[in-house]
Amino acid sequence: MAAARTYVHPETRDIALPRVLFALSEPLRLEMVRRLAAEGEVDSIELGPDLPRSTLTHHTSLLRELGVVFVRAEGRKCMIRLRGEDLDERFPGLIDTVLAGYDPDHAPAAHGEEAGE
Amino acid sequence: MAAARTYVHPETRDIALPRVLFALSEPLRLEMVRRLAAEGEVDSIELGPDLPRSTLTHHTSLLRELGVVFVRAEGRKCMIRLRGEDLDERFPGLIDTVLAGYDPDHAPAAHGEEAGE
DNA sequence: CCAATCGTTCGAAAATTACCGAACGATAAT
DNA sequence: ATTATCGTTCGGTAATTTTCGAACGATTGG
């Protein structure tokens, strides 16, 4: 038995608007958030199967530290979900409004979705 | 007569969401946008009277190039206004939602409001 | 126990951004 | 015309962010 992985998350009241906007200003992270909003809790590797693991950890950690996502260890894997309620409590409608203006055509090519769907 | 100052602005359709979010993710620029939304067109110097001029130009140019503000030369001065309609056409409700979640207590000290603290 | 897999951390490099003084051109006022 | 004011550009430095390989600890499966 060893200490399971734990993750530190900011309190809802400590989530800052400029930091959230910064988190969402990165195309890769914005695409991650879009997927999380659409699919609920997902395995972290689904957010960037083609990225180096350390790069993926960097972005997910940033999203976590800035209060955008909640991270949970499950075995070897790492489950991630959007802090939708917390964000909506703090900044009502922000995530929805941002994602409504999101154009998937400009999404970065870090995922599996291809032409012929 | 000499050539008046001109400013290049992106077309509305070329305004990109991640770039707008990046523009708003800087506390100084977010405060500028808040003032522009509240006061309409303002002299650029009102957006940061205590900042070095080159720093002020840097931020206003960034806001302009990313499609957030419209800049117009008037004599020696430089009038700036929010591209509210363009932004609302491209990303409906975004600016309003962002500013609704804005907490003035965390505004940077680059303006005239002083020590109530 | 052994090997494979996963996420994290560390370290360093590259890229981007922020910041500001100084010089410059344009404009306004006297 | 002369002076003062304003915004821009240039040049460089500092700070931040991104990226990724390598080593490590934890977990799963045989």
Image: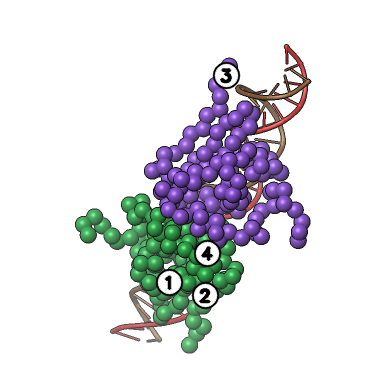
Chain colours: A green, B purple, C brown, D red
Are the residues under marks 2 and 1 on the same chain?
yes
Residue A12 to residue B60: above or below: below
Question: First in sequence: mark 1 or mark 4?
Answer: 1
Are the residues under marks 1 and 4 on the same chain?
yes
Q: Tell which residue pokes out farthest to the front in this image.
A: B39
Q: Which dot marks residue B55?
A: none
Which residue in the structure is indicated by mark 4? A91
Front position among marks 3 and 1: 3
A60 and B61: which one is in front? B61
Q: Is mark 3 on a helix, strand or loop?
A: loop
Q: As shown in the figure, which amino acid type bears the numbered disc 1?
A: Arg
Left or right side of C8 for A102: left
Q: Which chain carries label 3?
A: B
Q: Is mark 1 on a helix, strand or loop?
A: strand
Answer whether residue A19 is visible to the viewer in this image. Answer: no
Front position among marks 4 and 2: 4
Front position among marks 2 and 1: 1
Which residue in the structure is indicated by mark 2? A7
Q: From the top left corner, tell me how far across and down residue B5 is, in percent.
A: 56, 27
Q: Which dot marks residue B2?
A: 3
Front position among marks 1 and 4: 4
Q: How far apart are marks 3 and 4 (CA)?
A: 48 Å
Q: As shown in the figure, which amino acid type bears the numbered disc 2?
A: Tyr
Q: Do the residues labelled 3 and 2 touch (CB within 8 Å)?
A: no
Q: From the top left corner, tell me how far across and down residue B102 is, in percent.
A: 58, 59
* Quarter of the image where the C terminus of chain A is located: bottom left
Residue at image position (77%, 56%) is B115
Front position among marks 3 and 2: 3
Residue at image position (34%, 55%) is A104
Q: Residues within 10 Å of mark 4 (few under 14, many from 20)?
A: many
